[in-house]
Amino acid sequence: MSGMPRRSLGARRQSVSLLGLGCASFWAHPRFPLARARQVLERALELGVDFLDTGASYAGGLAERRLGRLLRELDRDPHELVVATKAGTLVGPEGRLIRDFRPASISEQVTGSLDRLGMQRVALLQLHGPQPDDLSDELLAALEREREAGRVEMLGVNGGEAVIARALECGVFDVVMPFVSVLRPEGRASVRAAAAADVGVVAAEPLGRMLFAPPLLEWLTRPSGLWYLARALAGGRGFLRERRRLAGVLKAPGWTPAQLAFRWVIEQPQVASAVVGSTNPDHLSELARVTELPLPEPVASALDALLHEGGGVS
Ligand SMILES: NC(=O)c1ccc[n+]([C@@H]2O[C@H](COP(=O)([O-])OP(=O)(O)OC[C@H]3O[C@@H](n4cnc5c(N)ncnc54)[C@H](OP(=O)(O)O)[C@@H]3O)[C@@H](O)[C@H]2O)c1
């Protein structure tokens, strides 16, 4: 029996593991060996993780295929887990990301995801980074039709503060997925607003991609690291400034900076699951160890002061 804590996800009271696994990023990349991806997923399941987050556009569609295939290999019924996928972004023929929130394409997108996952229904379908204006009545009706058809159990929205605020007004969504981490503390406002509306919250990028403590040596010496480094540099050099700002604060005996940052996110009782991406099974075990430990008080106070004053950068 795993000791993974579970929290309730919104008004439907679906319970989910507090640590979620992001089946995206380098885990889904063709250059990350399938056998290693399997070890990561296997460890997550052993730890009691059952919230598995993926998306149609991740790794050009490979993420959903990989997740579906590995669950079959591991003989796990995906319908007994909480598999979440996303619609609204697709990868086009030349590998370019295409945004598509047209109501008419939703049904086709869900069919594509179910085919790639090898599933009959998903627990959660989230719109992937829409703009507030994308949430038209027609789109909401198209999403409701998917729910009525039994292909989707819960509906959600992933994105920034503005679209989450708009989503909460719609009364259609069961779940929202804001970005919330020590680098994006402003995401806490979305967390609180969702909880007040009885809408479930899953936190995206709870480790802020580790930009506050980038393991530069690993990033320079491993294929996954080079990919993480390229992604960090694509976002500008702001992460080096954040590293300096947070390095002195994310320190406590017996804790790693990742554990402290993760714990800070799940310290918010409204976060049902914090969805971490990883290529390393031991990293997941490390995070699972702090799901029931309170954040050390000096770190909590120092983060309160720092993040209250200055906010964060993405
Ligand atoms: N990026 C988006 O736009 C987006 C949008 C919507 C949803 N999401 C969801 O959010 C999930 C997480 O996003 P993400 O992977 O981009 O960012 P993240 O979870 O904040 O950070 C991932 C980074 O943390 C490292 N890490 C994980 N556990 C660690 C530990 N215990 N110690 C040290 N380093 C650790 C990983 O490296 P290792 O591989 O070495 O562990 C990786 O570099 C995605 O998988 C996806 O499901 C993302």
Image: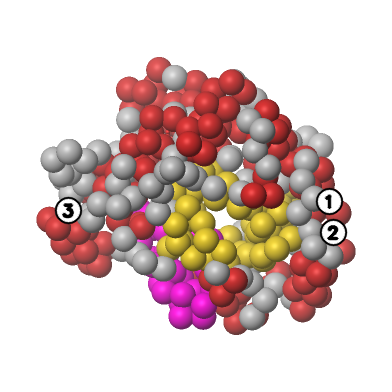
Q: Residues within 10 Å of mark 3 (few under 14, many from 20)?
A: some
For the question of whether residue 108 can be seen, the reply is: yes
* Dot 3 or dot 1, earlier in sequence: 1
**Residue position for label 2:** 107
Q: How many marks?
A: 3
* Dot 2 or dot 3, earlier in sequence: 2
**Residue position for label 1:** 111
Q: Residue at x 44, y 57 (%)?
A: 6
User: Label 2 is placed on what type of residue?
Assistant: Ser
Secondary structure under the numbered disc 1 in the rendered image: helix
**Residue position for label 3:** 296
The answer to which of 45 and 187 lies nearer the viewer is 45
Q: Residue at x 70, y 33 (%)?
A: 72
Disc 2 to disc 3, C-alpha distance = 47 Å
Q: Quadrant of residue 166?
A: bottom right
Q: Which residues are magenta?
A: 176-202
